[in-house]
Every structure is written in C-alpha cells, then in structure tokens.
Image (cartoon, grey):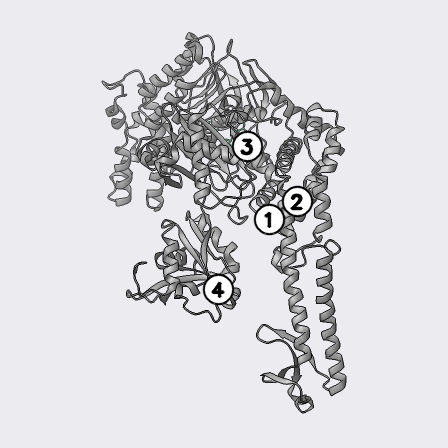
C-alpha cells in the first residue's frame, strides 16, 4: 500500500500525504466523531491502548488495511497512554466543518474527489518532551525537553518545560552535562543525528531521544530563532550571550517546537542560565544512594517523601528541584532558614498562608495553557481564585517582621484588572468546555443576553404550545420533544391517536407513540436553534477575547507562581520540622561540621513500634578531625550514620531545619558518596570496576570544602588489595592539601585503624555493640576507638542460617584468626590447615549420599574464603540456605 497507489480512496490518499510529513509519529486521523489509526500505527495503537484492531478496505490493490480507532472525545484518555509508552503522536484534525463543506459544494460541478474531501491537517505533534495535557503530566514533576549540542570547546545543554514555560541553558564538560541531565531527568532529548555515537558514549541509551539534522545545530540558526522569539537584539539581557554551545542547544529546542507545531509560546519569557557555581554538586550516584527523590526499594521512602508537605503543585516541583540543587551561598541559605523560623514563631501567619495556598492550584501550568490557547473555562475561574488568594498572602508578607518575606510580598502582583474581568465575564461555576455553553456570565454582553432571552423565551413558548394543544385536543399525555433528525416534535401516545388534528404531519411511529410536527413548531424551532447556535459562537468569541487579554499578564503571573511556590516550600519545611522535631542549623562559611545527636530523617519515621532511632554525634573539620574512620560489626548502623550526615548537611543547605539537637554546618561545595553498588553494572562493568571508577571521580573532583562518604570501599576485591586501596585513598585525602575534604570512612577492615597512629587528622570511631552470653546487642552508638570484630557470622545466624553452617563458620573463623600471621604465597592464610580441622559433625553430613547435601558441600568447598568479603559471604550463605530449604537458587 502506498500513496502512489492510484486506486486508493481519496481519504486514504489524504491520510498518506499527512503521514509522510511525520513518518516516525503515530498518526491519529480524525474521521467524523473518531480518531482512527491505519496500517502499522493501528497495530501499535491497538496494543498500547487495548482497542480492537479491525480492517478497512482502502480501495488500494493490496487488500484490507489494519485499522483501530476511538471516539474523538476520548482523546484525553488515550493520548497520554501513547505518550507514556514513549510514542510521538501526530494529531490530524478536520480543518473545516463537514456540514458547511457539504453546503458549500452542493450543486457545484467539475469538482474532483479530492476537492470534495473535508480539509485535514496536522494540528499538533505531541511527544514525551512536549506535553501539555494534565493526563500526561505528573503534577509534582517538571516535564523537560532537553537538547544537547557537542560544541568545539564545550558541551551545551538546554532544557524546556513547555507546561510551565521554564527555559534554561548551560554548558560545560560532558560530565557536567550528564550530571544536569541526571538532575533534570528530561522526558526527551534532542541531538544532532551525526553525533549519535558521541551521545550514546557520554550519556548512554537510557533517554528517549529524537535526532535532528545537523544544520539545526548551528549558532546562526539558533541565535536567529531565539532573537526572533524574544524580540530582542541580543541575548545579553539573559546573561547567556557567552554560552555558545548552550545557545545552539536552545536554538534546537526552538526549532523542534516549530517542527511539532507548537507556535503559541508566549509563556516562554526568558532563557535562564544554569548557574553551576551557585549549587552544591551532587552526582547521580549520590542522589540515588542518598535516596533523595526515590527510594531504592519499592516500598521504601525517599527524603522527598518525608519532607514534602507542599500544598501547590508548583511548590512540589520547586521542592524537587531544591533537593538536587542545594545552595552554597550562606546568606541565601539563611534567608530561607529565617522564613522557616518565622513560620515557626508565628502560627497565625502560618495558618493564613496555609489556608490561602490551598486556594491557589497550579497557577503556573494554567498560565502556560493561557499562552498556548488551551485553557478551559474552569481553569480560568481557578486562576481568578488563585489571584484572590494572592491578596491576603501579599498583605501578610508585606507586614511580616522579616525582610525577605516583605520583599516577596512586594513582588506579588494582584493583577486586579484581570481578576475583576474574569469575575465579571465568566460564570462562577462554568463547564469544562466552552462548547457546552453557559460560560459567559449574564449581564456582560447585551448581545448575548438578548440571544439568551430569545432562546429561553422560545423554550417557554414551546411549553405554552404544549399546554394549549393539550387543552385543545384533549390529548392529556401530549409532550414536546427534540431530536437531531427532525428537530422539535409533538409526541402522542397510541391511546390518543384518534384525537390528532388534521394539520399535524406525522414524522415517526414508535411502538407506543407517534411523533408529529406542525408549521408553528417549525417556525419557533428555527428561532430557538438559530439563537442557540449564535449563543455558542458568541460565547466562544468572548472567551477567546478574554484569553488574549489574559496573555498580557503572563509574566506577572509567572512571577506570582514562582513566589508562591517558594513560600509553599518554606512552609512545608516549617511543617515537617515541627512535626519531626527538627532544629535550625547554624550555617556558616567555616569548614566545621558539628552535628549533635543527629538522626536519619527517613529511618526515624519508619522505626518499629516501641523502638527509637539512636541519635549520634558527628564532628569533622579540616584542622583536627578531618577523617572519621568508622568500624563496627555488620548491621551496627555505619551506613545509616554516613547517610544521615549527608542528609543533614543537604537539608541544612536547602534551607530546612535538621533532625538533630543542634547542628553547625560549614557549607559544603560537593557531596560525594560511594555507598553501595550502582547500576552501571548493566553496561558490562564489574562491581569493582564501577567502584573504582566512582572513587576515581571523587578523588579527581574533591575540594577542601567537600563532604566525602565512603562505605566499605574496596570490598569488591580481595582483602589485601581492598585494604591497600582504601589506605591509599584515605592517605591521599589526608595528605593532599587541595583534597582536605571532611570525610566519613566506614569499613570492615580493622587494619585501617592503624592509620590513626600515622595521620593526625584521622580519628577512629566505632558503632558499638555489646556481647551478652554470646549474643550481640546492637547499641547503635558511635564511640571513639576502633573495633575488633565484624560479628558477620552472628548476623548470618540472626538471618536464619542453619546452625550447622554457623557452627562451621565459627570454627573456620577461629582457625583463620589463629593463623592470621601465617599467610601463604599469595597473601592468603593456608587453607589446608582449615580443611584438616573439620568438625566431626560437618564431615558426617557431607559424607552422606544426599544430592542436596553434596550440592551444599560443593558450594562450600568451591568458596575462596580468603577472597570473600563479608557481604559476599552472607549472599553465599543465603544461597546455600535456599538449597537446603529447597528454594532453588
Ligand atoms: N542509630 C540507629 N538507631 C536505630 N536503628 C538504626 C540506627 N542505625 C542503623 N539502624 C538500623 O540498623 C540496620 C543496619 O544499619 P546499617 O545498614 O547502617 O548497618 P551497617 O553497619 O552499615 O551494616 P553493614 O556493615 O552490614 O552494611 C538498619 O536496618 C537501620 O535501620
């Protein structure tokens, strides 16, 4: 089947010509009251949407074409499903009214079949990165489209959220751009198709991408597009003039908007520079391992889950952004903390703001819909309500005893004229769609009022006709009704059929009744229907005039949305801080980190009933105690301590109070964590390789103001290699002046406790446990000094390991400890000694001729104990347990 197929029906020819414009998009072809898909599109759509796949004869010579469709009014239900499945969707609509078209061509001769067709065209190309529909968007998340440009000296990045109008650009190393891509998680990324290899090499294959022609990625094209859009002579006003690669990427975004027919974009009012230097650097491993936005386990909680108490969607989106861009500037951090404290100390103020924020809704996205001309009457009323809420918020902020709040209050714009206009023009509870009518308020337009009188009067008159004719004819059940086929009619039940007067014209016979029309009825019908049609047209016109007027207010309303989001985030901090007993940290420019009785903000909310999270002190500086070497048994709470320290610093630097009794945070410029494995493994790298790559990245980028957390570094290799690497890294951090980062180093290698003796700023600590009657009790308290044991076998026992194995492991351990100094050629304790000293019990069970036991024996004998890390040992034991309990590996 192809366009050239001359036997195709005119409609199919039209379909193919439109499909050819966007071959990579799924085409929704409007056909009467349906959106239809054909060919391969139909197969894909039916699979994603679960709609029936049928066939239609397209007149071509290749037989039937697959077809699937859905009613046009269900577009909002089906379109998001296609977009979420990663599809690009071209929406083809009828560009003229079929009724009017039929009337226009009636009687005309010499028209071709194509001339007789209703004109159709692609009205929008919806892609994952450019979505406006509430059904596609997540209200607490931005929906970014990104473009990457491989410049000569820098890699450029641009990001646009068309649903909010936010447009950003920046440039730097590939590493920097990758970090930003990770932080902003764009839904779609554009790049030059000739740089596909580079893109995949640096940024991987995880993004939904769209390749564009190379000419799009030229500075001239980009500048021209941007200057035209902003109506400026240069980009200096935006502070991005010097970012050549960033500008090219931004131009590509503008080009893409054109390509996808997104041309009403007045709400993109500026291009902001991504200011790396103002924010703490968090790489993607840190964001993931600290579980800032998402928990690692499905049923877990992220930090965002715990501290997000925002009321408005834009507040939620802003908080998400703040989490991955903590501040570095002390005055800005303190401004936020001041406001949180103000909320704390002024409950009345706080209550007022909270109540008013509940009325605001998604002001930011509503105003974007105004720009693209897609706002519904109900949203216009919501916008008015939001503007009403601005007044008391502004008043309260302006009279607050806090400079920053007063400044925010001053910037809020009441937009009174717009608010009053909406109040006057739109009914208080309008329908969702303008086409339903009843949108424009009575009393606003005399013309509309008059038409409404005719319509209402006409309807009253119809009732009069009904009453009069009932009396005249004695047909007591007479009813006036309406249908689309022959308009208004009089319905007579069969029992009264004989009483129908002569002049009535029968139009329809039903089982129980007959329907008639009269000349008088038709006359009034014309009047009423004419008026109703005119009312809808006039309402639509008045509504769109209002929308055009609203567009003038876009910049002010965007500022309002931003300020309200800001206030919302800080109020959220106040709420969570009060509920969870957080305190205001002292944030300054020193390099001290002094946390007194700190807690883990997420774990503490999940403690089992009756248990309490044990708080701990952490002190770090670059003079006396730069590195805390933390040892302690498995399960003691080392990782939790590391993470809570980073989270407390991060919370403080986003302006939130922190879970501690007191905290002093000398601002950090970067937080590095090497905690747990990362998912790079899927790219074919080994655990150890990934661990070393990440550690190398830390050492290459660390500064004296950074915070570094290493958890069990080196565990992916043999014990001696691991210890050596860990030692060398800690030594580097201690000895290298530019790398004097405050560091927490949790390890199972007790050997590293030796370092304290040689390096003055390294101090040993351990998370303590108590041994009572051979049982270990976890105290979770960080105390000075190193620790001797790992108690890994004890943890295995708690985990439900069979007793015989635990017993054997203890024997092996004792043996190894006794012979610790007696190592073999490859630095390994001599295995033959251990093998010789097997317990009687174990020997017996392994000699049994049982396939399960012999499998267990093989597993254990195959272990290289000397090269096993404690975690690997645990995993192995778990596998063995599964073999014994019959759950296959
Ligand atoms: N201070 C604390 N108060 C109460 N519970 C805690 C505390 N610290 C940790 N825990 C709990 O103890 C468990 C083990 O903690 P964590 O994973 O930090 O131990 P670990 O020392 O890092 O262990 P491993 O060395 O085996 O990785 C976790 O379930 C955590 O919820």
| Quadrant of res 737 | top left
Which one is earlier in the sequence, the residue at label 2 or at label 3?
A: 3
Q: Residue furthest bottom?
A: 498
Q: CA distance from mark 4 to mark 1?
A: 24 Å
Q: Residues within 10 Å of mark 2 (few under 14, many from 20)?
A: many
Cβ–Cβ under 8 Å for marks 4 and 3: no
Cβ–Cβ under 8 Å for marks 2 and 1: yes
Which one is earlier in the sequence, the residue at label 4 or at label 2?
A: 4
In the picture of the structure, the residue carrying the numbered disc 4 is 32
Q: CA distance from mark 3 to mark 1?
A: 22 Å
Of the pair 204 and 866, the residue shown nearer to us = 204
Q: Residue furthest front?
A: 109
In the picture of the structure, the residue carrying the numbered disc 1 is 375
Closer to the eye: label 4 or 2: 4
In the picture of the structure, the residue carrying the numbered disc 2 is 383
Which one is earlier in the sequence, the residue at label 4 or at label 1?
A: 4
- Horizontal side of residue 4 vs 184, given as left or right: left
């Amino acid at each position: 089947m192809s366009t050239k197929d001359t036997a195709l029906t005119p409609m199919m020819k039209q379909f193919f010509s439109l499909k050819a414009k966007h071959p990579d998009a799924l085409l929704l072809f409007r056909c009467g009251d349906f959106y239809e898909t054909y060919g391969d599109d139909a197969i894909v759509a039916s699979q994603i949407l679960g709609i029936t796949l049928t066939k239609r004869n397209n007149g071509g010579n290749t037989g039937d074409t697959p077809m699937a469709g859905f009613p046009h009014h269900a577009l909002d239900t089906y379109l998001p499903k296609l977009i979420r499945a990663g599809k690009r969707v071209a929406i083809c609509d009828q560009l003229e009214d079929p009724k009017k078209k039929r009337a226009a061509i009636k009687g005309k001769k010499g028209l071709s079949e194509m001339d007789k067709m209703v004109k159709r065209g692609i009205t929008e190309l919806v892609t994952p990165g450019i979505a406006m529909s509430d059904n596609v968007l997540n209200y607490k998340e931005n929906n970014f489209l990104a473009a990457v440009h491989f410049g000569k000296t820098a890699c450029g990045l641009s990001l646009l959220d068309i649903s909010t109008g936010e447009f950003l650009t920046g440039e730097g190393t590939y590493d920097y751009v990758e970090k930003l891509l990770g932080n902003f998680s764009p839904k779609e990324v554009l790049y030059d198709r000739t740089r596909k290899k580079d893109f995949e090499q640096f940024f991987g294959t995880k993004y939904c991408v769209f390749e564009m022609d190379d000419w799009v990625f030229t500075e001239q094209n980009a500048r021209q597009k941007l200057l035209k859009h902003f109506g400026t002579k240069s980009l200096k006003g935006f502070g991005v003039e010097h970012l050549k690669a960033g500008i090219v990427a931004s131009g590509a975004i503008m080009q893409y908007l054109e390509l996808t027919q997104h041309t009403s974009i007045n709400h993109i009012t500026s291009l902001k520079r991504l200011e790396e230097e103002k924010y703490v650097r968090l790489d993607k491993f840190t964001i993931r391992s600290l579980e800032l936005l998402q928990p690692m386990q499905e049923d877990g909680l992220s930090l965002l889950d715990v501290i997000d108490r925002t009321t408005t969607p834009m507040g939620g989106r802003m908080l998400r952004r703040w989490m991955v861009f903590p501040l570095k500037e002390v005055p800005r951090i303190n401004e936020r903390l001041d406001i949180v404290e103000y909320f704390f100390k002024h409950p009345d103020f706080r209550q007022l703001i909270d109540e008013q924020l509940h009325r605001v809704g998604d002001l930011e996205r509503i105003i974007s819909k105004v720009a693209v001309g897609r706002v519904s009457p109900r949203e216009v009323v919501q916008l008015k309500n939001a503007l009403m809420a601005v007044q008391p918020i502004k008043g309260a902020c302006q009279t607050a005893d806090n400079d920053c709040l007063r400044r925010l209050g001053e910037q809020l714009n009441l937009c009174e004229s717009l608010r009053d206009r909406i109040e006057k023009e739109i009914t208080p509870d309008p329908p969702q769609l303008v086409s339903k009518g009843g949108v424009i308020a009575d009393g606003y337009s005399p013309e509309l009022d008059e038409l409404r009188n005719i319509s209402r009067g006409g309807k009253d008159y119809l009732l009069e006709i009904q009453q009069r004719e009932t009396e005249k004819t004695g047909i007591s059940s007479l009813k006036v009704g309406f249908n689309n086929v022959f308009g208004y009619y009089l319905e007579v039940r069969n029992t009264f059929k004989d009483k129908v007067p002569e002049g009535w014209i029968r139009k329809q016979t039903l089982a129980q009744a007959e329907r008639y029309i009269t000349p008088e009825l038709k006359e009034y019908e014309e009047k009423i229907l004419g008026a109703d049609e005119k009312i809808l047209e006039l309402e639509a016109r008045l509504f769109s005039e209002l929308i055009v007027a609203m567009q003038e207010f876009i910049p002010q309303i965007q500022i309002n949305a931003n300020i309200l989001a800001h206030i919302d985030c800080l109020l959220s901090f106040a709420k969570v801080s009060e509920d969870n007993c957080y305190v205001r940290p002292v944030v300054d420019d020193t390099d001290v980190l002094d946390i007194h009785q700190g807690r883990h903000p997420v774990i503490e909310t999940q403690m089992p009933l009756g248990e309490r999270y044990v708080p701990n002190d952490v002190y770090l500086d670059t003079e006396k105690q730069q590195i805390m070497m933390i040892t302690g048994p498995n399960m003691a709470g080392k990782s939790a301590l590391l993470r809570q320290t980073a989270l407390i610093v991060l919370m403080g630097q986003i302006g939130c109070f922190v879970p501690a009794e007191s905290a002093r945070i000398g601002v950090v410029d970067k937080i590095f964590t090497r905690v747990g494995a990362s998912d790079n493994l899927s790219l074919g790298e080994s655990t150890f390789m990934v661990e070393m790559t990440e550690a190398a990245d830390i050492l290459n980028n660390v500064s004296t103001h950074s915070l570094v957390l290493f958890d069990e570094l080196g565990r992916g290799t043999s014990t001696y290699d691991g210890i050596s690497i860990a030692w060398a890294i800690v030594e580097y951090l201690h000895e290298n002046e530019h790398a004097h980062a405050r560091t927490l180093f949790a390890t199972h290698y007790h050997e590293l406790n030796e370092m304290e003796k040689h390096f003055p700023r390294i101090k040993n600590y351990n998370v303590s446990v108590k041994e009572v009657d051979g049982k270990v009790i976890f105290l979770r308290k960080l105390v000075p000094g190193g620790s001797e044991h790992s108690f890994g076998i004890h943890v295995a026992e708690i985990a439900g390991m069979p007793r015989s194995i635990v017993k054997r492991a203890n024997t092996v351990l004792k043996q190894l400890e006794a012979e610790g100094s007696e190592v073999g050629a490859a630095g390994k304790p001599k295995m033959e000694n251990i093998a010789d000293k097997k317990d009687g019990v174990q020997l017996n069970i392994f000699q049994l001729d049982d396939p399960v036991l012999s499998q267990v024996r093989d597993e254990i004998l195959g272990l290289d104990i000397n090269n096993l890390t404690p975690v690997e040992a645990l995993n192995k034991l778990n596998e063995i347990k599964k073999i014994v309990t019959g759950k296959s590996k």
